[in-house]
Amino acid sequence: MFKGKYIDLQYLHQICEGDKQFIADMIDTFLKSAPGVLVKMRGHTEAREWKQLGDLAHSFKTSLMFMGIQSLYDAIKIVEYSGRQNQDNGSLSQQVDKIDTICGAAIRELSTFRESMK
């Protein structure tokens, strides 16, 4: 299964038991939803809405895991925990920047891989 610079689809392949259509559907869902999640994360950060940011990070964490974007696991956990504590630990904006940048690169990588599946 595909492993790139930002993504590793081994876990997705495993849980889908190699079902290529299901894998394609999961990738498509991520590609459609992730950009909106990133916009919402930025909005919550700018508005200093830490609880909403933490809740959003919690729900997005699973998507990152399915797509194997391992370089964001620590950042998303920090955002989730600090946000749910309703406090900025001093680095939330920086962590959201990291999530936005790396996830954007992962989206491009996934898009290319998804096209190769057709």
Image (cartoon, rainbow, N blue to C red):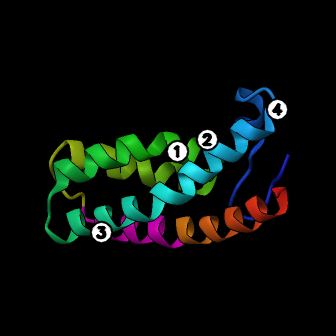
Residue 63 shows which numbered tag? 1
The residue stretch that appears in magenta: 90-101
Residue 92 in which image quadrant? bottom left
Q: Is residue 51 visible?
A: yes
Q: Does the magenta portion include 96?
A: yes
Residue 18 shows which numbered tag? 4
Which type of secondary structure does the marked residue at label 1 adopt?
helix
Give left or right: position of 21 versus 82.
right
Q: Spatial distance from mark 1 to mark 4, Cα to Cα?
A: 18 Å
Q: Spatial distance from mark 3 to mark 2, Cα to Cα?
A: 22 Å
Instruction: Identify the residue position indicated by label 2 in the image.
Output: 66
The answer to whether mark 1 and mark 2 are in CB contact below 8 A is yes
Instruction: Identify the residue position indicated by label 3 in the image.
Output: 42
Q: Is residue 86 above or below residue 90?
A: above
Q: How many marks?
A: 4
Q: Spatial distance from mark 2 to mark 4, Cα to Cα?
A: 14 Å
Q: Spatial distance from mark 1 to mark 3, Cα to Cα?
A: 18 Å
Task: Check disc 1: other Cα within 10 Å, few if <14, some if 14-19, many if 20+.
Answer: some
> Residue 52's x, y, as percent?
20, 50
